[in-house]
Image: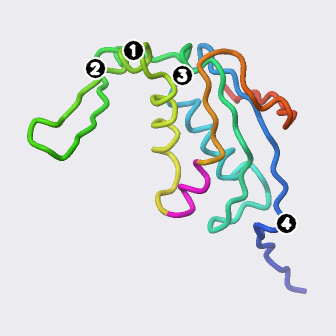
Amino acid sequence: MQRQTTIAKKETMTRKWYVIDATNKPLGRLASEVAVVLMGKNKPIYTPHVDCGDYVIIVNADKVHLSGKAETKKNYYNTSGRPGGLRVRSSGEMKRNYPIEMMERAVWGMLPKGRLGRQIYKKLFVYVGGEHKHEAQQPEVLTLKY
């Protein structure tokens, strides 16, 4: 008797909402765990070409932990494409002034690139304080492995 491989379909997917508190969590480890949940790799029905993941809300993004000398040594680069249009910001500056962007960039780097990755990325919501506006979805608190 041969077994059939189960392929997930986007029409039959049921999605949950999770909330994660980023207080004192290492940025990279948090981002990798969030990426796994967004892609749906934590589910037994995971299919690489289908968006199987759940919605993730990250609160307290400004209280994330950066290990070692990351606050001074790690830089974020943006360019306008024009001569002299390079902007360099350190991780410490990003954490103080742009914590939402720092968290989103960390998670985006761990998602697949292309049409599916952009679709998956839309299920991520990041907030600076402990409050969020998704109470109607009744999110569950997600505890991470570490």
> Going by the image, does 70 lie left or right of 73?
right
The disc labelled 1 sits on which kind of residue? Gly
Q: Residue at x 73, y 60 (%)?
A: 46
Query: Which residue occupies 52% across, 39% down?
Result: 107
Furthest toward the right, the residue is 1
Asked whether the beta carbons under mark 1 and mark 2 sit within 8 Å of each other, the answer is: yes
Residue on which disc 1 sits: 68
**Comparing labels 3 and 4, the label whose residue is closer to the camera:** 4
What's the residue type where badge 2 is placed? Answer: Lys
Residue at mark 4 to residue at mark 2: CA–CA distance = 46 Å
Q: CA distance from mark 3 to mark 4?
A: 34 Å
Q: Which residues are magenta?
A: 115-121
Binning the other alpha carbons within 10 Å of mark 2 as few (below 14), some (14 to 19) or many (20 upward) gives few
Residue linked to disc 3: 26
Callout 2: SS: helix
Q: Earlier in the sequence, mark 1 or mark 2?
A: 1
Closest to the camera, between mark 1 and mark 2, is: 2
The residue tagged 4 is 12
Q: Which residue is mark 2?
A: 73
